[in-house]
Image (cartoon, rainbow, N blue to C red):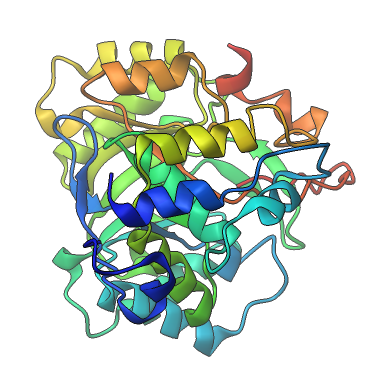
Amino acid sequence: MTSAASTLASRVKPWTGTCSSSKSCAKRHAPKGVTVAQLAIAWVLTKGENIVPLIGARKRDRLDESLGALDIELGPSDVEQIERTVPSGAAAGTRYNAYLTGDLDSENA
Amino acid sequence: MSNSQSHDQRNVTLKRTVTRRTLGKHGPTVSSIGLGAMGMSDLYSKADHAESIATIRAALDAGINLIDSGDFYGSGHSELLIREALTGRSRENVLLSVKFGELRDPVGGWGGTDNRPAALKNVLAQSLQRLGTDYIDIYRPARLDPNVPIEDTVGAMAEMVKAGYVRYIGLSEVSARTIRKSARHTSHRGPADRVLADLARHREGHPADLARAGDRAYRLWRPIPRPHQRPLEQGTRGRW
C-alpha cells in the first residue's frame, strides 16, 4: 500500500447512525478532496480484475470526475475501512421496487 | 502514486491511466472503466445532445474503449447518438456492448421482454443499421425472458457470432443457474461463442462467486445507484 492510500484510509470517517441512502452515507464519510463517485468507482475497481465499472457520465466534467477515481489507489486496509464505514445493508431501500425485483432472474433464482 | 505525491496534491498530479482488463478467460480486453450511455438517452432528465457527443468522444480520447448501450435506450436514440459520436473514429478501437429484448412504446413505456431467436435477429439488424456498423462486440439480453428458454436465446446469438454480426455473447441480470445453462449450451463452440455474464448485482451472492471462479463470466458494475426508484405507474416500468 502506498502512503497516499494509507492517508486515505485514515481519512474515511467512522460510520455512525443511519443514512437515508448509500449516497448520503458515503458523502458523509468521503475523505476531503475525494468525491463519493470517485470513492465508489475506486472501490469497485478493487473487487476483481474481472469487474469493469460502468460510469454513466453525461457531461465532460462528470466524466473527468469519474476518471479521477483512477488516481485513487485503495489498499486492503482502505477497502476494509470503507466496508466497515458503509457495511453491506447499511443503505436504505432496494435496487428496484418490488414489482421490478420480481422479474430479476439474478435476485430470484 | 509515488510516495512523493501526497494525497492533497492529487489534483495537480493526475495520472488517470485507464488500464485494460480482460472480460472472462477468452473475452475481449477492455478499458478498466466503461462508459454507460443510458443516461444520455433515457430515464434521467433530458441530456444535452452536443454535450453527450462531446462526452463520448472525450471518454474515447481518455482511453475508454467500452461503450455500454441498449437498443431500448430511448428506443434507438442511444445507438444513433453513439453512431454520431463515433463518426470519423476507427471502429475497431471501440467495443460496443448492446443490450436487447426490452420492449418499449412511443411514450417510453415498457412492454415486457422478448428474447425469442426471431426477435433478437430482427432487433440486431436494426441495431446494426442505427449504429452504422456491421458487427456488435458484446450482445446480450437485458433480462431473462421467462417465456423463452435461455438455450434458445444464446443459441440464436451463437448463430449471429458465426455469421459475424456479433463478437461475444453476454448475459445481464441473470442467476448462476442461467449462466451455467448458457455456458453448457455454448461450450462446444469456439471461444468467440463463450458466454460473458454481466452481473449487475449490488450484493455479494452466488452469481458473483461464479463470476470469480468461472472463465466466462465477468461483471459490469454500476457503482453509483440511481436515486431510490420512485413507485412507477403500471406500463411505465423503468429498468436499465
Q: Quadrant of the N terminus of chain B?
A: bottom left
Residue B108 visible from this viewpoint: yes
Q: Position of residue A60 (x, y in %)?
A: 47, 81
Tell me what residue is drawn at x 52 percent, y 30 percent: B173
Quadrant of res B87: bottom left
Q: Is residue B138 above or below residue B78?
A: above
Q: Nearer the viewer, residue A83 or A98?
A: A83
Q: How many marks?
A: 0
Q: Position of residue B184 (x, y in %)?
A: 26, 11
Q: Position of residue A100 (x, y in %)?
A: 74, 33
Tell me what residue is drawn at x 73 percent, y 59 percent: B108
Q: Nearer the viewer, residue A62 or B8?
A: B8
Q: In the current view of this chain or complex, which residue is farthest to the left?
A: B190
Q: Nearer the viewer, residue B93 or A34?
A: A34
Horizontal side of A62 relative to B185 (left or right) equals: right
Horizontal side of B176 relative to B39 (left or right) equals: left
Residue B98 visible from this viewpoint: no
Horizontal side of A20 relative to B155 (left or right) equals: right
Q: Position of residue A76 (x, y in %)?
A: 37, 34
Quadrant of res B131: bottom left
Q: Is residue A26 above or below residue B181?
A: below
Q: Is residue B144 above or below residue A86?
A: above
Q: Is residue A102 above or below residue B138?
A: above
Tell me what residue is drawn at x 51 percent, y 80 percent: A61
Quadrant of res B220: top left
